Amino acid sequence: MTTRQRKTASAGARRSTITGNACQPAGDRQVVLVLQGGGALGAYQAGVYEGLHEAGIEPDWVIGTSIGAINAALVAGNAPQHRLERLRAFWDMVAHKGLPALWPGLPGLPTFWTTLSAINQGLPGFFAPNHRAWLSPHLALGEETSGYYETSRLRDTLAGLVDDHLLTACSPRLTVGAVNVKTGRMRYFDSRDEPLDLRHILASGALPPAFPAVRIGDELFWDGGIYSNTPVEAVFDDNPRRNSLVFAVQLWQPDGDAPQSMWQVSGRQKDIQFSSRVDSHVQRQAQIHQLRHIVRELTRQLPASALAQPDVRDMAGYGCGTVMHLMRLVAPRLADEDHTKDMDFNVARIQQRWQAGLDDARRTLARQAWLEPVGPMDGLVVHDLSTDTPIPQEIR
């Protein structure tokens, strides 16, 4: 057997272990890819997807918010053989390629220059300044144009990289989160329940005050990350419940050192804000899933005469035996990063984050922790495979 044949066989074996089919769930277990919001940090998610793709694993369901919604659309909106190339095309298009070798002795300069350039000029393929918005904060701009930048560039970019028909094909299922501007309520748009198009992706990434709200029907929507940057909740709340292998890709560090300067305060505040209740969601859902297993076991102790009663059957319906394995991958910190890291589209940083995601995905898949036995009352099992080791600074 050749090396290529061995890799193909290994990938096929791993796929059958997880789902048995790259596009549709086999039996009652689904593979879910959950992508958080975080601007330039989203390159890490692309690397994670590459790791799954090279192992022959394609998600049955992709969920995203903000940049996670964009990455999710690039996956769901393309056939499996084109997904990786379209992700690469997007990230290459939005990468800032300036300042490759100037003043190499000054740490942080490429990041500063990239951020300053993005603020003043926008990003190619992504957004451009809305100069009228800078004239006065009180200037009436209109409901769909009130933002410091406009995102027609992003719409054009995605139109060339995403097939609208595939977004709605449910192969894989696609869910993106946005918040209703008027009601303040979170809304998950789901291709299982309604047709999706690029408006839904743009709405999920419409982070105020930078980007204007996006109209869908009669309602206006902003980036879902301002309400909850943790789209994993969509998996927990899904009905019907199913056995799931969930790869939750987080871009913000929930843990960190106490800041010692106002600059560091801004960075720590942003990490806490956008890591966004991940731990509390997981802890609560672990308790709920355990209670569902307990209800199932108690129901088994009831006589048939009791189970025949409609109200008892209704109560028994709260029980289940589904198991969710949550594989949590957290993007590591880069050396010298600060609170502007989500605006750091420097090409070298993007490459570093992408490689970090690829490395973490390979490590996660090699461990196959979801194959380890679990207790009969365990409904949600968390495998935290993140690392907080900074990546060496290699920007030139």
Image (cartoon, rainbow, N blue to C red):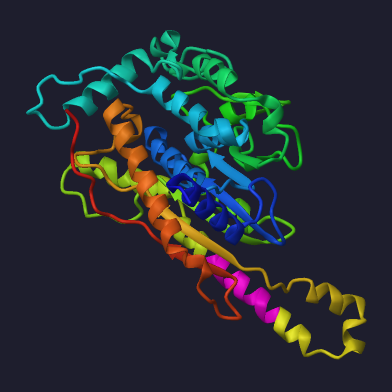
Q: Is residue 346 visible?
A: no
Asked if residue 41 is positioned above or below residue 305 in the image, the reply reads above
Query: x and y percent of residue 107 in the render?
Result: 13, 32
Examine the structure image and report whether residue 153 is included in the region drawn in magenta: no
Asked if residue 70 is positioned above or below residue 302 in the image, the reply reads above
Asked if residue 10 is positioned above or below residue 341 in the image, the reply reads below
Q: Is residue 276 visible?
A: yes
Residue found 41% across the figure and 9% down from its top: 131
* Magenta-drawn segment: 283-295
Residue found 42% across the figure and 51% down from its top: 361
In terms of image quadrants, where is residue 26?
A: bottom right
In terms of image quadrants, where is residue 98?
A: top left
Left or right: residue 260 compared with residue 198: left
Left or right: residue 199 compared with residue 304: left
**Viewer-side residue, 209 vs 11:** 11
Query: x and y percent of residue 296 in the render?
Result: 72, 79
**Viewer-side residue, 370 vs 140:** 370
Examine the structure image and report whether residue 291 is included in the region drawn in magenta: yes
Residue most toward the front?
1
Q: Classify the position of the C terminus by image quarter.
A: top left
Query: x and y percent of residue 108 in the render?
Result: 17, 31
Magenta stretch, overall SS: helix
Left or right: residue 264 compared with residue 294: left
Residue found 66% across the figure and 51% down from its top: 21
Asked if residue 14 is positioned above or below residue 263 in the image, the reply reads below
Tally the numbered discs: 0
**Viewer-side residue, 57 vs 228:** 57
Query: x and y percent of residue 282 in the render?
Result: 51, 62
Residue found 46% across the figure and 25% down from its top: 90
